[in-house]
Amino acid sequence: KSFTWTGPDAEQAWEFLRRSIVVRQIQALRAALTMAQFNQGAFGVTLLRPAYEELLWIEYLAKHQDVASELVRLLATHEITQSLEAQNQFIGAKAMADIGFTQKFIKRRLAAAKEPAARLREIGRQLRWRDGQTSPSIAFIARKNGRESEYSYIYHATSRFVHFSAVENFRRVWGRSGSVTIKTENFSRYWTDFALYWGLRIFVETASA
């Protein structure tokens, strides 16, 4: 949680990312355990998708350490720009101005983001991302890390929990013909075990990477 360094700040982006991922995953595991203690452990599954994607990115960037720190900074810049655009479109010019973001500032910020985006696409071409992409798909990264089948399994399992799923909702329905109970607790133990097992496994592999 504490980190000191010498030299340019910009060179620490890769280290910041690695440390912040470890910290976030520890906190996610604690949250999953707390939910399990209160018989709500099934919802720990929602924490697995980002953790697994973090593992994939850490392994992928470790293979490209010559550009890792720059790539992390460029990705963050691109995401900040996307957030600014989304918020501006959603709440409008007046509300943005009310919270301190004038349209002049926004236009200047978006214009300034073009150069980093171009550099991001340049690195992407070097790393053989799809032409013009500012970020590869997670499936692409999984394939490059040799985790394609594992990723497909985790993606399928967590998708059932974080997106609409008829069968996932029906898992809450148990009983006999004519009388059922409908509650998450009917299937909670299965998902709790899944969340805690994969949460710990992903964390150990992330920390090792």
Image (cartoon, grey):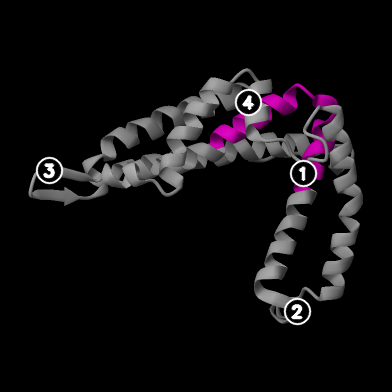
Q: Is residue 103 magenta?
A: no
In contact (CB < 8 Å): disc 3 and disc 4: no
Residue drawn where x is 67% and y is 28% of the image: 141
Tell me how far mark 1 sits from mark 3, CA to CA: 49 Å
Residue 74 lies, in percent from the top left, at: 82, 44
Residue 5 is at least partly visible in this image: no
Q: Which residue is mark 2?
A: 97
Q: Quadrant of residue 101?
A: bottom right
| Closer to the eye: label 2 or 4 | 4
The residue carrying pointer 1 sits among few (fewer than 14), some (14 to 19) or many (20 or more) residues within 10 Å by Cα, namely some
Q: Which residue is mark 4?
A: 142
Q: Which residue is mark 3?
A: 175
Residue drawn where x is 66% and y is 74% of the image: 91
Q: What is the three-letter code of the residue carrying label 4?
A: Ala
Q: Which residue is mark 1?
A: 75
Mark closer to the chain start, 1 or 3: 1
Q: Which residues are magenta?
A: 51-76
